[in-house]
Amino acid sequence: MELAMGIDTGGTYTDGVIMDLSTGRVVKKSKSPTTHQDLTIGIRNCLAGLDGGFWKEIQLVCLSTTLATNATVEGKGSRVGLICLGHEVSESLPVAATYCLPGGHDIRGNAREPLDVEKLRDALKRLEGKVDALAVSGYCSVRNPEHELAVKDEAERMLEVPVVCGHQLTSDLGFQERTATAVLNARLLPVISQLLDSVQQVLRELGVTAPLMVVKGDGSLVDESRARQRPIDTVVSGPAASVVGATFLSGEKDALVVDIGGTTTDIASLREGVPEIHRDGAVIGGWSTKVQAARVHTFGIGGDSLVQVKRGEVQIGPRRVLPLSRAVADHPYLMEELKETWESGEKGMDIIDAQPFDCYLLGRYTPGERLTSWEREVVGCLAAGPHSILHISRSLGRDPNLLNLKGMINRGILLPASLTPTDLLHVRGTFTRWNREVAFLVAEMAALRLQMKREEFVDFVLEEVHRKIASAILQGLVRDLGYQQVDLAGETVLKPFLERILGREEEKFLCRVYLEQPVVAIGAPAREFMPAVTRLLNTRLCIPEHAEVANAIGAAVGRVVIKGVILVRPAAEGGYVAYTPWERKGFICLEDAADYAQRVGREYLVREAAEAGARDISISVQRKDVYSHISYPIEEEIFVESRISLLAVGRPWPRQGEMR
Amino acid sequence: MSLEEITSAVIAGQPEKVKELTQKALDEKIDPDSIINDAFIAGMNVVGKRFKEGEMYVPEVLMAAKAMSAGMELVKPLVTGQSIPSKGTIVIGTVKGDLHDIGKNLVAMMLEGSGFEVINLGVDVAPERFVAVAKEKNAQIIGMSALLTTTMLCMKDTIEVLKEEGLRDKIKVIVGGAPVSRDFAEEIGADGFAPDAGSAADLCEEILS
């Protein structure tokens, strides 16, 4: 047995799982509410649910946590000083003080102006005792980090606080985002350390001695000591972990992961076991950063999407409502009110922005929030419990068209309950957790508005749901290809083709798509919707078991991945320059530069992978020379650059006898 | 008199005649905006199309542009700055280390002729300067030209400076010049490439639409 434990502290639940990696079997799983005030309590409860006498045998513990994300959003963290070199930040950042000093480089890595050591020492002196950490960011520092490194040296000596440099966290251009990444990383240093300390404490108490690793935003794992230095990498790891977990459960290496929830459908891609990464960095707590995160496309279609019948047409989503079957399960008297609606002549009436069977619940109302006198009346009417729209209209003596509830719904004071795909599944009998009787009644009422039979209506709407999900998947794939602006449903030229792809039309010609990747589906309604969706898209479907703890599984089965790139480019003054993540170095001939880049690239990968906690490391260093065609003065190819792509993948697994 | 006469004189590249006719039009109280749009720009549009199709050659285009400028000198003082219709602002120049500017100036004139506001930075323009001016003038497009295979790589530098400054999404980049190919433009990540001055204006309109 090779036992690994995965823990995911998500927004709502803390999930835990013990897996036997030699067989891929889930040995134990557990779910507990996340305790936001102190995550360790939730983790402790979750681990209690995993107890099976395995503690001593566990060889690896992997943690995926939203703590760093939450701390950033809530503005928690240490006091950070920021030193910018040669450029100012364009958007303010959460720092105690900023100094913008002379320095920085041009895009080719030549110093634009020398670093002013006197001014630097002066600034550091003023920061003394006022900050717990320092962030340093230089203009074009990813093309030459010498100034950032010089500041780091000086600052560590003078201030004795941790110093974070922009170029060490990313090799991407983008001064503002790089600076934000460095600042947020510096703020998070104590936050992540506290969490890891207390998790290690909990593990020690249980007798677990295995090494602890943390999931990064790209789904890969990193040793806890590394995570303490680079907490920003662990932000937004949830989606990536869920993609890794879902595909592991399905046994696929390349797959499209579709997570259908109540409100949304989230779509992500996994290639060769690694989630595809968003080209731009993640936005965290409102700040754009260079943090690598899984690329997830979100669409407003889910089990609880509002189904509206309007002017003979059906519209599904993007708004989410409470399914009526669920509302009636919680408040049975609503059934009586809806029966009254059915028996009265009002079942077929048209109401602006509503349907005659809608019900309303009181949502969140913050005391002190200003309400108009009418709004107070509505709130009063619902204080004792939810009611149907016609009941509200009668008790308040106003026409249902004049109730004017939209504003209160938008502010979250009222929660509408209405017809949803979930209710239609109750009619069909494939999903019947809540009240079926109301589902029959409401589907009948809605069907009447389309002059359809009830069963015919249910089939029709559910088919539309399948088409909507299929079309969302296609839209996600098109965006993956780089067509960010293309809206498939809005492109009229595509309509005849899309209608046929989605099976709405068959006249004159047929049109089919064949998805390259299989689909792995998770989420509550996946079993109901996805078989039809994958039939439309002509691909395999896998709905794995244990999907409810996919995040924790993704943590447990993650790998260590180190990526990087070294560029070799012709220099303006002749010769070649290699831009590595730690220096800029000149050469006379290309081959020397490229050989050097490949050699140090390999050394870098070995070093980084070992520090990240990897074993059995496989390393790939690939050189790609880029040429471009020109036709003047003669037809020839000119050299643009050499790209040395660095990739190391390893198992986060101690060899026999190498346990700590 | 009719504006068509001015248009013909612009196309024919007759600065003196354009000047004379424009003055006459102004004396007849013809709206200056209309002279610019319906006479000058209309003429340059024809010139652009003919040049693109090989019916006109560089010297003729230069003469047409000169003719238009001659007329413009008379009209410009009469219209306030903002009422000159502009399709957008373009910063244009020859890249660092390169002094060739005939083609680039031709493009600048064609763009001006079709209603863009053009800021011509001249030759030997550093990447940072392109970006700084574009930022200051709120330009939508940076246009770069190079004749030398050794300098054309500087175009990529400008695109990368835009990335470092976080402006890559806001400012489009077009490139041109004898050695520049579509392949090269794509390789360095430019938004557009035009093989000749005549197509440059169409390209800019397409990019901004």
Image (cartoon, coloured by chain):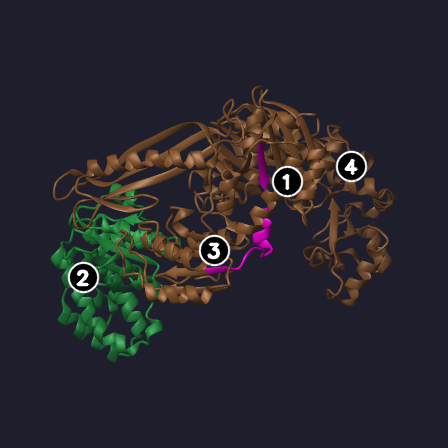
Tell me the distance, in whole angstroms, between the alpha carbons under discs 2 and 4. 74 Å
Closest to the observer: A120 or B203? A120
> Which residue bears the numbered disc 3?
A161
Q: Eyeballing the image, is A431 above or below B110?
A: above
**Chain that is coloured green in the picture:** B
Image mark 2: chain: B
State left or right for residue B83 relative to residue A393. Answer: left
Which numbered disc, 3 or 1, marks the residue that appears first in the sequence? 3
Give a yes or no on whether discs 3 and 1 share a subunit.
yes
> Which residue type does callout 3 highlight?
Val
Q: Nearer the viewer, mark 2 or mark 4?
A: 4
Does A14 sit above or below residue A392? above
Mark 1 to mark 4 CA distance (whole Å): 50 Å
Task: Compute the Cα span from label 3 to label 2.
Answer: 71 Å
Helix, strand or loop at disc 4? Answer: helix
Q: Which mark is residue A543?
A: none
Which residue is under mark 1? A201
Which residues make up the magenta segment? A61-81
Residue B11's tag is 2
The secondary element bearing badge 2 is classed as: helix
Q: Earlier in the sequence, mark 4 or mark 3?
A: 3
